[in-house]
Image (tube, rainbow, N blue to C red):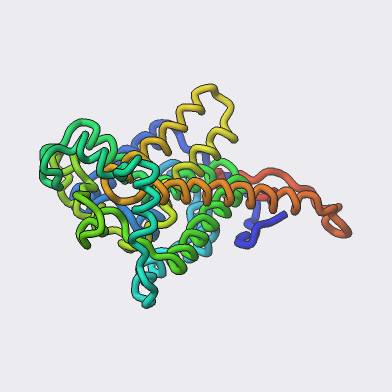
Amino acid sequence: MAGSWDPVPRAPGPVAATPRSARVGALTAYGALLGAWIGVVGVPNDTLQVFAWLWLGTVAWNIRAPWRSHVGFLRDWWLPVAGLVVYFFSRGLTDELGLGVHVHEPIALDRWLGAGVTPTERLQAAWCGDPCVQDSPPRLFDLYFTTVYATHFVAGLTIAAVLWVRSRSEWQGWMRRLLSINFAALAVYIAYPVAPPWMASQMGDLGPAARITGRGWSEIGLERVDLVLQGVGNPVAAMPSLHAGMSVMIAAYGVHRLRSVWRWLLVVYPVSMSTALVYYAEHYVVDILAGVLLAWLVLAGASAWERSRRAVPPTGHEEAVAVRPTRVGDGTTGSSTP
């Protein structure tokens, strides 16, 4: 069955195959342009920037396709992207609704989990140095954790772009999960705003816990990226951790969909992301656990809904309609059920 943002059906027609040489040339130019953008402006971290760069990426991938195929990307994506834009800006307003910010409950829970000391304080004391400040000398693992942290802003939509090129039905299913986890997290942010560890430390409710997000990138010439990473989002949207939830959802989705034994390496992603979030004083461990729970609820809920839709028997005209898989990125048409 069609999804809620099905585009107007396109007339079938031949699509010119893109030769390898043309594809390599287009992707090389795309990579150079993106690299220049990151160096000057920073890693794309808002929905519209990521959307624009992903669209250009699909254009480069199939550079010989007619423009009606490339415009199909905009036609398919506009509604879910509009929803994510609404989420992006609504999230920044949740700390202005006048609700009290919760500070002490997550600290108490993390101290219980850490046997009297929060895991953030333990990690920063062991790994960051004394004193632990943003400008203290980073180590190699700082560069790794910062890179993992930054992937949050592009990973979900990048997967969506790959799926759009390969199979529209898979793309619909992933977009359904992506939108659900974002808006479910937003609902909790509104109802239960939480001060992250670095803020609680500044308020005097927690011991030393510096916000060191972005460590390591300034040393390799990405100072602008470092600043962008620290300026993203709403500071009291800590519970649940969407960074952790998204990384768990990506890993679980990949493990379920892929068949190679190497797929289990995807588990490293949420573990690394969660470690980075606690180490950088962006989230408590309880925020991470709430994000993990949210991811599994979204995955289970989306799968249950899709099974229920498939269980509805077709009637009337639907029985006579031939359904064949769609490969949107290749310009073919049809419909399928995620």
Q: Determine the residue positioned at 20% across, 31% down.
A: 140
Looking at the image, residue 117 sits to the left or right of residue 10; the answer is left
Can you say whether 33 is above or below 240 in the image? above
Residue 329: % across, % down: 53, 45
Residue at the farthest right position: 316
Do we see residue 227 in this rendering? yes
Q: Is residue 268 left or right of residue 66?
A: left
Left or right of residue 53, residue 325 in this image: right
Relative to 315, is 267 above or below?
Answer: above
Query: Nearest the camera: 164 or 195?
Result: 195
Quadrant assignment, res 26: top left
> Could you say which is closer to the camera, residue 247 or residue 14?
247
Residue 246 in the image, given as x and y percentages of width and height: 46, 47
Looking at the figure, which quarter contains the N terminus?
bottom right
Query: Is residue 199 positioned above or below 34 on the image?
Result: below
Specify whether residue 26 is in view: no
- Farthest residue to the bottom: give it: 98
Query: Which residue extends farthest front?
Result: 116
Q: Where residue 67 sits: x, y (%)?
A: 48, 54
How many badges with numbers are in the image? 0
Q: Give the side of residue 137 with respect to residue 308, left or right.
A: left
Q: Nearer the viewer, residue 334 or 64?
A: 334
Q: Position of residue 274 (x, y in %)?
A: 38, 41
Residue at image x 55%, y 40%?
A: 253
Residue at (63, 47) in percent of width and height: 300
Instruction: Identify which residue is drawn at 57% across, 31% down.
Output: 258
